Amino acid sequence: MEKRTSVITNPDGSVVFKMEGAEIPAEWSQLATDIVVSKYFRKAGLFNDKSQGETSVRQVVYRIAHTIREAGERFGGYFASTEAADVFEAELSYYLVNQYGAFNSPVWFNCGLYHEYEIKGAGGNYAYNPTAKADSPEEIYQIDNNYERPQCSACFIQAVGDDLMSIYDLVKAEARLFKYGSGTGTNFSAIRGKQEKLSGGGTSSGLMSFLEVF
């Protein structure tokens, strides 16, 4: 590891972001440094301290690898023993530090913030309950702290119905996904085309008018 400065500038040379003293693996390029420091370091809120943020790749990698390891132990059946869990965490950390692989952005953004730093997020997302009976009302539940069951998937595919409430429900769902760094695509084919008849006797303004909202 070595200490580096990360600077992001506009084409005119004005500084968008700067951080000095970031601890980075010596083998990493400056581009990799700038990405992880500017995008994936948590900048504030560690242990309820608004002035405390991540300053090292060690912290980021430990936050992710240890949280995933603990989830495997907590939900059960993933590791044969504590020693196996230790090996998993060590090897995952090795892969990340040595750039053999990298998670998608929501993992870097969200995973471990609550479990390692006690950072809480607004509720409203949904989570799977592995102990609930299949297809029971308790199997999927709404959470109060979105970082306790962090959003770690990058891509979502959604659908929308041919009515205003469904369209604006989709706007709300997309906003929630974007808030935690994910992306989304939607099948809009159910929405009727321009000039097609409405039940009230008028005609539809068409899909393109609604896409302006998105």
Image (cartoon, grey):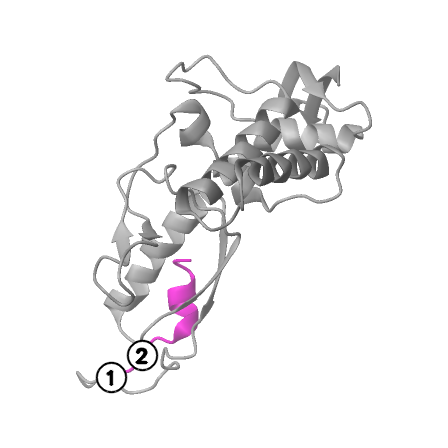
* Horizontal and vertical percent position of residue 6: 70, 21
Position of 102 relative to 86 (above/below): below
Left or right placement of residue 195 versus residue 24 in this view: left
Using the image, tell me which numbered label, if any, was put on residue 12.
none
Seen at 37% across and 66% down, the residue is: 210
> Which sits in the foreground, 165 or 184?
184
Q: Are marks 2 and 1 in contact (CB under 8 Å)?
A: yes
Q: CA distance from mark 2 to mark 1?
A: 6 Å
Seen at 38% across and 25% down, the residue is: 118
Seen at 41% across and 41% down, the residue is: 74
* Horizontal and vertical percent position of residue 206: 38, 76
* Horizontal and vertical percent position of residue 42: 52, 26
Going from N to C along the chain, the mark reached first, 2 or 1, is 1
Left or right placement of residue 83 versus residue 124 in this view: right
Q: Secondary structure at mark 2?
A: loop
Picture quadrant of residue 58: top right
Can I make out residue 16 in this image? no
Which residue, given by chain and number where applicable, does mark 1 sit on?
Answer: 198
* Horizontal and vertical percent position of residue 66: 53, 32
Q: Which amino acid type corresponds to the residue marked 2 in the rendered image?
A: Ser
Question: How would you rate the neighbour count of disc 1 (Cα within 10 Å): few for under 14, some for 14-19, many for 20 or more?
Answer: few
Q: Which amino acid type corresponds to the residue marked 1 in the rendered image?
A: Leu
Q: For the magenta stretch, what is the residue range?
A: 203-214
Can I make out residue 162 in this image? yes
Picture quadrant of residue 211: bottom left
Which residue, given by chain and number where applicable, does mark 2 sit on?
Answer: 204
> Which sits in the foreground, 211 or 139?
139
